[in-house]
Image (spheres, rainbow, N blue to C red):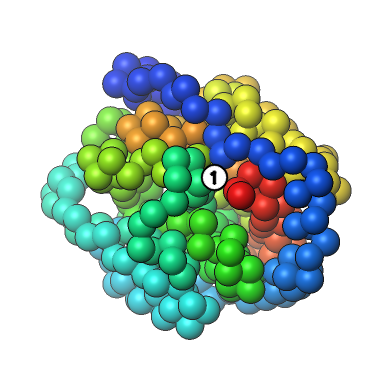
Amino acid sequence: MNRAVLTGWLAVSFAVFAVGCSRRSASEGEAAGTSPASVVAESVLTDEGIGQRLREVVGFGPRASGSEGAKQLREWMIRGLEESGWKVERQVFVSTTPQGEVEFVNVIARFGAGGEGGGGKGSRAILCTHYDTKKFSTIEFLGANDGGSGTAGLLEFARALAVEPRLASRVDLVFFDGEEAVQQFSESDGLYGSRYYAQQLRQSGEAGRYGCAILWDMIGDKQLGLTVPSDTPVELMRGLEEAAGRVGLSGRVGRFSGPILDDHVPLQHIAGIPSMDLIDFDYLPWHTADDGLDAVSGASVREVALMTLEMLRDRLR
Ligand SMILES: [Zn+2]
């Protein structure tokens, strides 16, 4: 992600009139919140389980797009997703980067009937992250938070959602490749995976099925404090704040002073899906050799997962 001004993106964007997945009534939300299935889903999400996933993801070493580390991580991720009942699609494409052509692979997971199309306008949600790490020649960059936290969290979230098949079947889990810029973020460098994914969604005419997209990026800081971009759609921000309040995590949600260029931007401005970025950009080890396991916590990732789960339950029906 990058602090860059979004001028270029906004110049090619179009207005997003939808206001995100429609809300359920309070009574429906209460009923869902007390169902036995929902208790089980939370119990799958443990600090220890997510911490273990973090160690496993980081254990693959540097995971820059096109690298052996990225490939091995990806195949391990896919096995885990399939073991918990998700159908996985590899979205393979080649893009020209400042260092030549690179093959990128987005990983898209759908559950049950969710992979077979159908579903009305705005009836589905996208929950996404990036699994690549930034390539450095000077340091061994492990990206425990930047790349690792979202990946580990989403893998555990997939296991948790699987015990709520009805909800799981309404969510696409997407692990983007190529979030990181090879040199510097621009309209043609960085966000490779999300740009391609959003273009495909737009061209297929399927984008309208998705009422909202939620991105996780750098959610593992031991001192978690989300800095949600200032240009987040109002309806999604309200939904997040209400969900965080219901699970007792209001104190974790804050606002960034401006927009942030991250994988949610192509989803919003190319695919036209109301999108938000759950990110903690107040992270000193960002893009340094210190972004390792000592800087992250499974408990932080779990908190973001719990508020997201609450938000999805409330907004998908
Ligand atoms: Zn990064």
Q: How many marks?
A: 1
* Residue 62 on image: x %, y %: 40, 65
Toward which corner of the image does residue 263 lie, by quadrant?
A: top left
Which residue does the image show at 15% across and 45% down from the upper left? 96
**138 or 56: nearer the eye?**
56
Residue type at tag 1: Ile
**121 or 227: nearer the eye?**
121
Helix, strand or loop for disc 1? strand
Q: 168 left or right of 64?
A: right
Note whether residue 244 is visible. no
* Residue 34 on image: x %, y %: 83, 61
- For label 1, count other residues whose C-alpha is less than 10 Å away and answer few (under 14), some (14-19) or many (20+): many
What residue is pinned by disc 1?
214
**190 or 209: nearer the eye?**
209
* Residue 32 on image: x %, y %: 75, 57
Toward which corner of the image does residue 305 lie, by quadrant?
A: bottom right
Q: 195 left or right of 224?
A: left
Which residue does the image show at 80% across and 56% down from the upper left? 31
Q: 126 left or right of 248?
A: left
* Residue 190 on image: x %, y %: 32, 41
Quick check: 43 above or below 274? below
Which residue does the image show at 51% across and 56% down from the upper left? 171
- Does mark 1 have its CB less than 8 Å from ligand 1? no
